[in-house]
Image (spheres, coloured by chain):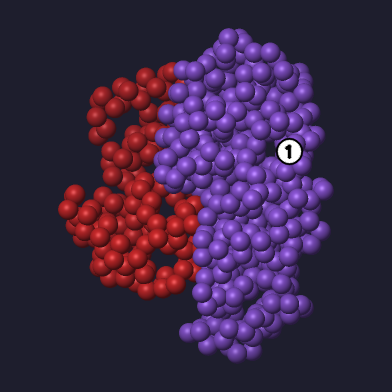
Chain colours: A red, B purple
Amino acid sequence: MLPETYINEVEKRLRRTGRPREMVIDVMLEVQQFYGWFSDEALEQTARLLNMNPLEIEELATFYNYIYRQPVGKYVIHVCDSVICWMTDGYGSFVEHMQEKLGIRMGQTTDDGMFTLLPVCCLGYCDLAPALMINQTVYGRLTLEKFDQIIEDLRREK
Amino acid sequence: MHPRVLLKNRKSGRIATIDEYRQSGGYQALENAFVKNDPPPGDIREILLEARLLGRGGAGFPIGKKMATVPDNAPHPRYLVCNADEMEPGTFKDRVLIHADPHQLIEGIVLAARAIEAEIAVIFIRREYENAARILEREIQVAREAGLAGKNILGSGRDCELIVHRSAGRYICGEGTALINALEGKRANPKRPPPYPTTSGLWQQPTEVQNVETLCCVPHVISKGAPWFRSLALTESGAGTKVFSVSGRVNHPGCFELPMGIRLSELIEEHAGGMIPGSRLKACMPGGASTRIMPGSMCHVRLDYDDMEQNGYRLGTGAIMVFDHKTCLVQVAANLMTFFVRESCGWCTPCREGLPYILDLLNRIEAGQGRAEYIEMIRKMCGHMKYSYCAFAPGAVAPVQGLIEDFYAEVTAHIENQGCPFKDGQSDKNYAGSHY
């Protein structure tokens, strides 16, 4: 269940705007933040808050890259696979290394629920290729060592 | 040294503050327009038209002409939408512009809104640019406190509210009509005009959608005039400067602001540091992922909307992706097509069905299972994309069309050898110039 304080706060914001539906993406992202992913319950809660049909929410949830309709780890690693990152030297072995380091394949989540690996389209950091984004932080000019360091740091932070 | 206009306040590691922007002449045009009504809205549109400021988001449509399609008696509120949903592979200029000088964009938005008498401006920004979104929110507040945005701008009695809207990530949202659907909380499928957004856009109100870079040009055009703006270009037909994002096999990838009409060779050699050691220029995408692949032998072309078009190419967003002699262009085309297949909204049939079909044929050719007739099948399927709803599908096939026309021999080599000739660095033959 969403916390009462959050529901009240969103309802207040929705009342302020003349057209609640313009806030649907904001609310979906916030609700997802609370649940960790956009579960069926998250979907129904969002529909109720916005007075929308659950199918209308599903239509949006399945459309956007950053709404997760399946469980994801605490850190979602979005690895750019568009042309500029892809053509950097050693890209193939870099992707292989990431999967080995985490012990998962693309699209999977580590057993401890810490990391999910997902391919993503161009992040807009082609000058810093190869790049990836973890939650909302972008890392560029990656090397195998740099990637390992990022993972170690995140593991320590928990 | 070429003059810099949009990136002249660019600092390393931080934004230009409002004071720095003002010291460089910023907010002067806004002050005159709001306090002295000089120039009035109609004249702003006229100056922009005269300046030949073309939309920098890819289509190259004149901003003044688009503004003129908002009818004088159109209802209020009117909306100005700043499109910061920059998601085309190879393109990152809007991110750099926002990080360099956010007030330049804010002034551009408020002035453009003034030109069509819009009272609400929305900045639609991609999720990956969270830092840029935060910068904008913070600096909009700074501008508001200085009376330069929000209610009753500089005591003129006129308003321009600025709202930052974050997307949840999908390339098609950058298409004007899809963007409007996204803002309304609907699935972001494009709508086929008419009506055009300038008469019936966001919430069925008049809505002008403009790219970040285009809007950044507006204050400079208004304060220094149309003749000055046109004189910045190196070509007779061009106008202004262009922020080029250069990436790929060059020594110094990055954003470079140069006069419109600069030669591609000068951009690569002198500004992007030339090709990386051991690499020779084979081809590039001159205007982002949805433009035709250009053989390296064309690098003398002038990067200008007209010149490029006369040569059969498009300047698009000005994102230059550089490929070297070891890069397999069939793989490049397949990678780009994977992007377009994934990002297609799936609404209309040519795009939803045709693009995966082309990708499948490209993958077969790359894997050594290609047949000679596949080339004709690809060509035919590419031709069908003009029946789609929006510009996404025709853009998606542009690189493939360039591949099978200008690099025909490279494609047939894959088919004849039953495999990729570039695998494991076996061949570095330059197939460019082998016209069909």
Mark 1 crowdedness (10 Å alpha carbons): few <14, some 14-19, many ≥20? many
Closer to the camera, B388 or B113?
Answer: B113
Closer to the camera, B242 or A10?
Answer: B242
Where is residue B226? Give x, y as percent.
76, 34
| Whether residue B28 is situated above or below residue B349 in the rendered picture | above
- Mark yes or no: residue B340 visible: no
Name the residue: 51% across, 84% down. Answer: B425
- Mark yes or no: residue A33 visible: yes
Name the residue: 61% across, 30% down. Answer: B108
Closer to the camera, B182 or B297?
Answer: B297
Secondary element type, mark 1:
helix
User: Given the image, what chain letter belongs to the residue carrying mark 1?
Assistant: B
| Whether residue B221 is situated above or below residue A64 in the rendered picture | above
Does A136 sit left or right of B353 as displayed? left
Most extreme residue toward the front, as rendered? B1
Name the residue: 51% across, 48% down. Answer: B170
Residue, disc 1: B229
Does A24 sit left or right of B363 as displayed? left
Name the residue: 59% across, 58% down. Answer: B271
Does A92 sit left or right of B399 as displayed? left
Identify the image quadrant of residue B138: top left
Where is residue A25? Give x, y as percent.
44, 36
Where is residue A10? Give x, y as percent.
35, 25
Identify the image quadrant of residue B400: bottom right
Task: Pick the quarter of the image with the C terminus of chain B.
Answer: bottom right
